[in-house]
Amino acid sequence: MSDGAMIDELRKVLKRLHYPLEVMLVCARWYAAYPLSFRHLEEMMHERGVLVDYSTVHRWALKILPVMAVIFRRRKRPVGTSWRMDETYIKVAGQWKYLYRAVDKSGNTVDVLLTAKRDLAAARRYLERAINLHGLPEKITIDKSGANTAAIKSVNDDACLDIELRQSKYLNNLIEQDHRAVKRITDPMMGFKSFWSAQKLIACIKTMHMIKKGQHLCPTGQPMSAADQFYSLAI
């Protein structure tokens, strides 16, 4: 599906939600960009004279943000070929789940994947997805994770590849620091109620984080604020 078709699909979604476009997009952006719960957004909208229930804002986020994340992925700047790969923890429905992430040596986000388990199968699924999106990296740096080590070796063996594997806690500080930027958004929230909604919303938080890092190819070719770049995904 082309960008134009995706934007048409987004407009259909917005039309069905029966609220002013500006209100819905502002709420969606605030949720993805700042450490706010849906109840916080309800209060903030009430202070601005917009009466909307937090559950409605939640519905907007689940409908709008995933479509915008897909549009962004097609406008994302290429990443480098030297990756730092790691996983962190996210609480979903009262249980810890695992968020696999990688950045290149410049700190640009490669991809993000939420998984129920932290094992070889999850690490390999993340790695194969990242390669499908961005092509083969020359090298991947990890910590001492046995699952990540086994995943990279198995991908190399099965596809006759030669991805260089490096194990270095020092070099992996870059991804550890980048985890914190995402956790600053997710930790103050009131938690994700289901794995399905967590997958969708975390992908959108990731999108806003990448926009802030300058990974969006602006359609105008001119400098734009992070907010304007986000809104441009709906145009």
Image (cartoon, rainbow, N blue to C red):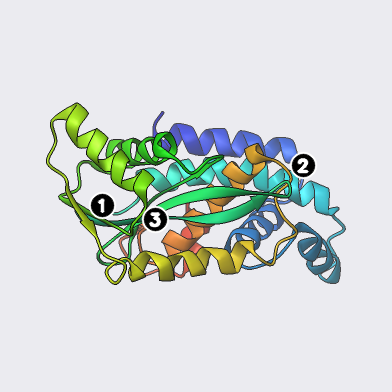
Residue at x 31% of width, y 67% of height: 169
Residue at x 27% of width, y 68% of height: 171
- Identify the residue position indicated by label 3 in the image: 86
The first of marks 1 and 2 along the sequence is 2
Q: Amino acid at mark 2?
A: His
Q: Secondary structure at mark 1?
A: loop
The first of marks 3 and 2 along the sequence is 2
Up the image or down, 12 lies above or below 180; here it is above
| Residues at circles 1 and 2 in contact by the CB criterion of under 8 Å | no
Q: Amino acid at mark 3?
A: Asp
Distance between the Cα atoms at labels 1 and 2?
36 Å
> Would residue 14 appear left or right of 10 to someone viewing this image?
right
> Would residue 161 appear left or right of 4 to someone viewing this image?
left
- The quadrant of the image that shows the N terminus is top left
The first of marks 1 and 3 along the sequence is 1
> Would residue 12 appear left or right of 119 to someone viewing this image?
right
Q: Nearer the viewer, residue 206 or 10?
A: 206
| Residues at circles 3 and 2 in contact by the CB criterion of under 8 Å | no
Which picture quadrant has residue 152?
Answer: top left
Residue 63: x %, y % from top left: 65, 40
Q: Nearer the viewer, residue 144 or 64?
A: 144
Q: Secondary structure at mark 2?
A: loop
Distance between the Cα atoms at labels 1 and 3?
20 Å
Up the image or down, 7 lies above or below 145; here it is above
- Of tags 3 and 2, the one toward the viewer is 3
- Identify the residue position indicated by label 2 in the image: 18
Residue at x 58% of width, y 42% of height: 199
Q: Secondary structure at mark 3?
A: strand
- Identify the residue position indicated by label 1 in the image: 78
- Report if residue 235 is visible in the image: no
| Residues at circles 1 and 3 in contact by the CB criterion of under 8 Å | no
